[in-house]
Amino acid sequence: MGLLDHYRGYDGALIPVLQGAQDIYGYLPAEVLEKISQELKIPFSEVFGVVTFYAQFHLKPRGRNIIRVCLGTACHVLGGSRIFNGLKELLGVDNGGTTEDLRFTLESVACIGACGLAPCIMINDDTHGRLVPDVLANIIEQYK
Ligand code: FES
């Protein structure tokens, strides 16, 4: 693995190697973590501990499109949970879940900084606001 050759022997290599591996695979499969552990001579438990500590790392495959549903105060008050439940139903996944076709991953977040558009969601880098459950199917249809 070129990535490992590049970083082998450097202090502080673990995080950039994990980031690089996740860029390649989209997530961090167990066998990749084992290889990183062996090659960098860092105990597997330590590698695993770092991966589970940082929210940026993922142990399971992620969808091509990441839907973040805001459940912050403003969105909650204006029906954010109805939007969240609507999306769960449409996609057939729970919080943190990924559809079987790897099209979507659904996550809840606390405030995406668009409270004036509450209730709102982000899909990848796009913000969709002032939502009602009826429009959700049309919105997700735009993301393949
Ligand atoms: S509470 Fe939802 S954007 Fe701020």
Image: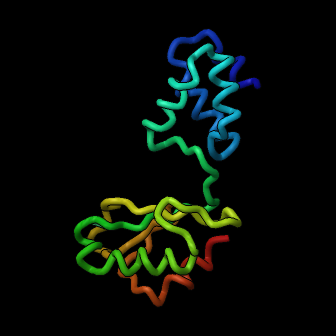
Q: Where in the figure is residue 65, as x and y percent of width and height?
A: 59, 63
Image side of residue 18 versus residue 118, left or right: right
Ligand 1 quadrant assignment: bottom left
Q: Residue at x 63, y 40 (%)?
A: 28
Q: Residue at x 65, y 34 (%)?
A: 21
Image side of residue 16 versus residue 69, left or right: right
Q: Residue at x 52, y 79 (%)?
A: 89
Instruction: State the residue in front, 81 or 94.
Output: 94
Q: Where in the figure is residue 72, as x and y percent of width and height?
A: 28, 65
Q: Quadrant of the N terminus?
A: top right
Instruction: State the residue in front, 76 or 93.
Output: 93
Q: Where in the figure is residue 41, as x and y percent of width and height?
A: 62, 13
Image side of residue 2 versus residue 46, left or right: right
Q: Where in the figure is residue 101, as x and y percent of width and height?
A: 70, 66
Farthest residue to the right: give it. Answer: 1
Q: Residue at x 37, y 81 (%)?
A: 82
Farthest residue to the front: give it. Answer: 45
Farthest residue to the top: give it. Answer: 9
Q: Residue 31's image quarter? A: top right
